[in-house]
Amino acid sequence: MPIFVLVFVDVLGLTVILPLLHLYAAAYGATPFQIGMVAAAFPLAQLIGVPLMGALSDRFGRKPLLLISQITTCASFIMLGMANSLQLIILSRVVDGLFGANIATAQAALSDITDDTTRTQGLGLTGAAFGLGFIFGPVISLLTLEISDSLALPALTAAGYSFISILLTWFVFKETLPPEKRGTDTGRRSVNPLLLVKYLTNPTMGVLLILIFAQQLIFFGFETLLGLFTLSRLGLMGGGNAYIFIVIGLTLVLVQVRFIGKWSRRYGEHRLVQFALGLLAIGLVLMAFTPKQPHVFYVKANVEYDLREQVVSSTEAILGDLNVTLPEDNNRGIFGVLWVFVMVIPLSIGAGLIRPSLNSMMTKRVGKQEYGSILGVSSSFVSAANAAAPLLGGWLFQHYGSTVPFLLGGVLMGVLALLSLLLVNPVSAQSMEA
């Protein structure tokens, strides 16, 4: 439970900031490309920082590295709140990305205290904390902006939550990897910049890492483009999309708290991976066929006015004007909205199952002394996908229309599901050979 609370508080701080990053950049006259740099700075920095911090946690313990990452995250939020230039905004995101490996270290701690039968459920707790954080964080963000027009307040609020996580780690969290369990084979666990190559070249581990990257690339593209998609198909603005994300968040929490542990013990992680990829494929393909029917309260002229008054989203920022075609006022109804709300259920269930199952399988292919390393590399693959997804998805949206990214993503996810039937097999806990 302390680890769940730690992750939730950390994610809460992050999600207070995420919806507003483009506003911070735009406040200093950033070009669309520069706004994109702000959005990409954090995941790109994580490519380097997360594997390094994970390996260090294997060597020096989870608690010291958690404290370092949380202190750095808190400092980066303060830097963002006090920033007086675009360069400082980007620097704050780079600093957090390089040293803020809070989640990967927390996952390693959970792996320390779970066994092969309970690890998927334990790792699912971090996903549940993510789901809750993504429900409450944006709400807190909007409330802070209602209180004050200053963009400093949301950033300092996030710093406050991060400070709470520091106190929780310092006073409540107990080290899960004591010195006697860190072993003496420092050669194997040295902080190796080629960790990524080491794991990728292992046949079974490489398959899992490629899977986690590919599914995250497709799914994060869906998350990034969902607002633009529902705008073009249903005429939904921020408020309507907020309800969709609440449904996604609640489903993620339900799956990862209530079902994933039971299902993993009954069917095995390899079956959950195959089932999750299948659900994601079906959900994306069906989402692409969302009827172009605006909701009952839609007025095209009002939406056009609101859009002119708003700053572009991070996806638009990277690629420039995506030229979203709005639906006409005729043919309004509720079927299109209901369709989307139903289709996000299989997508959310699949998303709730896939990463904890893949990460659990990875930890079973290494020794306990490498949990932080492999989960750090896994997180870096997720970060790489998060950086690339808005570029690829936005480009497809811009050049081929709103449905193509989802339809193509669903087909590719289906291919991954078929490949997983051949390549993803059950494993027993074992140490990976060097």
Image (cartoon, rainbow, N blue to C red):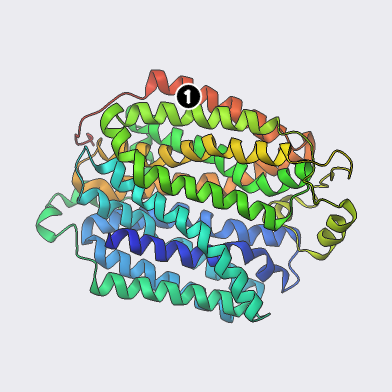
Q: Give the residue pinned by disc 1.
A: 417
Position of residue 35 relative to residue 257, above or below, is below
Q: Which three-letter amino acid code belongs to the residue tagged 1?
A: Ala
| Residue 47 seen anywhere in this rendered image of the structure | yes
Q: Position of residue 45 (x, y in %)?
A: 50, 58
Residue 372 lies, with reference to residue 149, above or below; the image says above
Q: Is residue 208 left or right of residue 86?
A: left
Tell me the element at label 1. helix
Mark 1 crowdedness (10 Å alpha carbons): few <14, some 14-19, many ≥20: many
What is the x, y in percent for residue 108?
A: 28, 52
Please report the residue visible at 18 percent of the width from the left and 52 percent of the height from the top.
186
Give the camera-side residue of 32 and 110: 110
Q: Answer whether residue 99 is visible to the viewer in this image.
A: no
Question: Measuring 61% from the left and 53% from the top, which residue is drawn there?
Answer: 243
Q: Taking 362 as reference, is 419 left or right?
A: right
Q: What is the x, y in percent for residue 351?
A: 48, 40
How far across and how far down the image is residue 159, in percent?
47, 75
Quadrant of the rendering where the C terminus is positioned = top left
Please tell me in which quadrant of the rendered image residue 388 appears: top right
